[in-house]
Amino acid sequence: MNRKVALITGVTGQDGAYLAELLLDKGYEVHGLKRRTSLFNTDRIDHLYHDPHEVTDSDRQLHLHYGDLTDSTSLVRVIQQVEPDEIYNLAAQSHVAVSFDEPEYTANADGLGALRILEAIRMLGWHRRTRFYQASTSELYGLVQETPQRESTPFYPRSPYAVAKLFAYWTTVNYREAHGIYACNGILFNHESPVRGETFVTRKITRALARIAVGLQRELYLGNLSARRDWGHARDYVEMQWLMLQQDEPEDYVIATGEQYSVREFVQRAAAELGIEMRFEGEGLDEVGIAERIHSRETRIAPGDVIVRVDPRYFRPTEVETLLGDCSKARERLGWQPRTPFAALVREMALADYQIARRDALVTMAGFKALEHHE
Ligand code: NDP
Ligand code: GDR
């Protein structure tokens, strides 16, 4: 039997890395689109990639192609060359806060990007050949009209990111209805992992608290601690992306855990994992977090030290306060359910960042400067 061929845009991102691994495990020939950057951007997939100059008898091969969602010709070239059975469109300027600063670029990549790929499938006449997955988002619900949110809940986007994703969502539906392309939207609620981008709130928290725990950092600045999210694990969610393209009929599905926690609760859970006891005082703008050391690892936090401070710089012009998903349709029709509970997700992320922080602390102790990144 011929191997299936998949093309993943955004293969260098969190979901792209998990999905590439899943598809390789399933025996796919996997191709990824990566954009040109001045520094290496393949950290998350380096373990899956073999240098073509090295001799290997493994056919478990990931192929990378330069291309950009804002550049139609590169997309047409890669799609024509790869002849994919399935395209997973995961590439995006995916940071909601950044989209307020770069609305035009976000609309171009996240909105028109999906259109460009669907148009390429249509122009190549591959309506029946190539299936398309669009990375849609719970951000479409924005100012929520119904709780929990399901496939039929009306959308109310609250950021340039969400507006761009709304365009991509409806474009996907329209190409399905107008041109008969097998095209699906996965409406995914927040999903995280140890390779989540460092500026999303969960990773920002686990990374900073781990560094605080080993004495590399003193404080963590956050925005809205009261925002509530339905957080799952990326590893579980990419399975659903694949499942959606294996059905008889293309449909849109909500993917979520059905449980909701606040940013503050995430901080508390992660701090507990790292042996830091958190106490929050005050409400709203004046809210500060107070840490007390309960037992020490390498921590240099003194009882009473403030380690979480609120910085209004991280507030958004229009915020999405609460999201909670109902994935009954995916559960009933596809037999899918999330496997990683909240506590296990936070533990995995906190421990992974603790390992990195310990390594950085050792490097620092040896007299070298550890890598630092600032938001
Ligand atoms: P990441 O930000 O980790 O990855 C985004 C990927 O898109 C990266 O590979 C990035 O490349 C690439 N990219 C960005 N702009 C372009 C462009 N113009 N052309 C080509 N590639 C580009 O996102 P996630 O993996 O977390 O999310 C995957 C998708 O799912 C995104 O579309 C996101 O909007 C959506 N989504 C994510 C959710 C989540 O909670 N994670 C929830 C719902 C939807 P580079 O590595 O060079 O930056
Ligand atoms: P989100 O994720 O906007 O839901 O988008 P993010 O982790 O950025 O924010 C979640 C909530 O936390 C609040 N918050 C902060 N957020 C960040 N980034 N930094 C902070 O310091 C901070 N403090 C509080 C935010 O205000 C927000 O309410 C993610 C992305 O992956 C999107 O691509 C995806 O579509 C949605 O999830 C579903």
Image (spheres, rainbow, N blue to C red):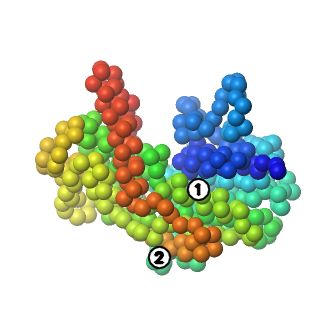
**Is residue 75 visible in the rendered structure shown here?**
no
Tell me the number on the disc at residue 238.
1
Q: Residue furthest left?
A: 303
> Compared to 298, does 311 lie above or below?
below
- On the image, the x and y values in percent for residue 150 come to 54, 75
Look at label 2 and name its amino acid: Pro
Drawn side of residue 354 relative to residue 40, left or right: left
Asked which quadrant contains residue 317, the reply is bottom left
Cα distance between the residues tagged 2 and 1:
22 Å
Drawn side of residue 260 relative to residue 292, left or right: right
- On the image, the x and y values in percent for residue 349 come to 40, 48
Give the quarter of the figure containing the C terminus.
top left
Drawn side of residue 13 relative to residue 273, left or right: right
Task: Give the residue at x 78% y 44%.
Answer: 82
- On the image, the x and y values in percent for residue 63 come to 70, 38
> How many residues crowd mark 1 within 10 Å: few (<14), some (14–19), many (20+)?
many
The nearer-to-camera label among 2 and 1 is 1
Task: Give the residue at x 63% y 69%.
Answer: 334
Asked which quadrant contains residue 216, the reply is top left
Asked which quadrant contains residue 332, the reply is bottom right
- On the image, the x and y values in percent for residue 345 come to 41, 55
Is label 1 in a helix, a strand or a loop?
helix
**Labelled pair 2, 1 in contact (Cβ < 8 Å):** no
Look at label 1 and name its amino acid: Val
> Compared to 328, does 8 lie above or below?
above
Task: Give the residue at x 44% y 46%.
Answer: 194
Number of numbered discs visible in the structure rendering: 2
Task: Give the residue at x 58% y 45%.
Answer: 17
Tell me the number on the disc at residue 204.
none
Q: Residue furthest top?
A: 367
